[in-house]
């Protein structure tokens, strides 16, 4: 009858343990941050987390470390090599807004989705999503810009009688966009004050 060999307990190098312990204490929170980031990478490899989730989580942690006084270079050393070395500078208040809202989402009930927490989606039916409002605003601005461009670029300086009138510029844009004149006129009326102020700021128009 064969007896199974009892597994030997791994030898613990006490000197090395002390060395690692001292290193961990010296690294402080950044050492823990590096370990946490490696865990995130592992979870992505396992298909548990997606890259966007990890990006928001990492941004939140990095922002917190920066606001706690850690230097940017030291924080970046905590990042996995897989994230690369390229960086960009971003105003801290923007990162703090992302961090605070992300952490609110992480601590919210499971029924709350990301869009609701970030305030970019309404709750329930009948409320416009922020994305839809944003796309509509971009459309209105683009069409209003086209009207101003057609109006100003025609040579309208207040001195030429053959310059394209504002009404004619609206008609041209409406025809090109396949919209009614009333719709384009409404867009332009809504945004022309802002557009004119921008044109004045860059000295494109006067008065």
Image (tube, rainbow, N blue to C red):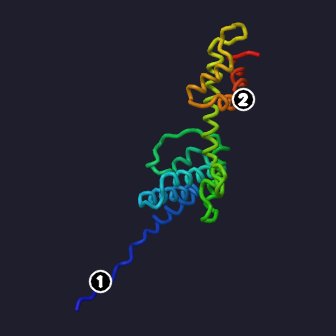
| Image spot of residue 183 (x, y percent) | 66, 32
Label 2 sits on residue: 189
**Residue 119: x %, y % from top left:** 66, 51
Q: Quadrant of the C terminus?
A: top right
Cα distance in 3D space between marks 2 and 1: 88 Å
Q: How far across and how far down the image is residue 76, in percent?
A: 53, 47
- At x 63% / y 23%, what residue is drawn? 171
Image height of 10 relative to 188, above or below: below
Q: Nearer the viewer, residue 10 or 150?
A: 150
Q: Is residue 187 found left or right of 37 in the rendered image?
A: right
Please give the label number shown on residue 5. Answer: 1
- Percent across and percent down for residue 45 are 41, 58
Seen at 62% across and 61% down, the residue is 112
12 in relation to 62, above or below: below
Q: Is residue 199 left or right of residue 115?
A: right
Taking the spot 54% from the left edge, 60% from the top edge, the residue there is 24
The mark found on residue 30 in the picture is: none
Does the image show residue 69?
no
Number of marks in the rendered image: 2
């Amino acid at each position: 009858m064969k007896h199974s060999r009892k597994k030997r307990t791994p030898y613990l190098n006490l000197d090395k343990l002390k060395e690692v312990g001292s290193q961990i204490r010296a690294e402080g929170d950044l050492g823990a941050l590096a370990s946490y980031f490696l865990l995130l990478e592992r979870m992505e490899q396992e298909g548990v987390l997606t890259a966007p989730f990890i990006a928001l989580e990492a941004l939140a942690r990095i922002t917190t470390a920066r606001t706690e006084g850690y230097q940017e270079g030291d924080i970046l050393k905590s990042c996995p090599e897989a994230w690369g070395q390229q960086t960009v500078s971003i105003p801290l208040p923007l990162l703090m807004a992302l961090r605070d809202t992300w952490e609110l989402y992480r601590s919210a009930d499971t029924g709350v989705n990301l869009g609701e927490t970030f305030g970019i989606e309404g709750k329930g039916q009948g409320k416009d999503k922020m994305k839809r409002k944003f796309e509509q605003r971009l459309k209105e601005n683009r069409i209003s810009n086209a009207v101003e461009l057609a109006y100003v670029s025609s040579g309208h300086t207040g001195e030429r009688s053959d310059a394209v009138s504002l009404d004619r510029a609206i008609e041209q844009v409406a025809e090109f966009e396949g919209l009614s004149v009333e719709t384009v006129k409404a867009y332009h009326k809504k945004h022309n004050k802002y557009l004119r102020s921008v044109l004045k700021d860059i000295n494109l128009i006067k008065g």
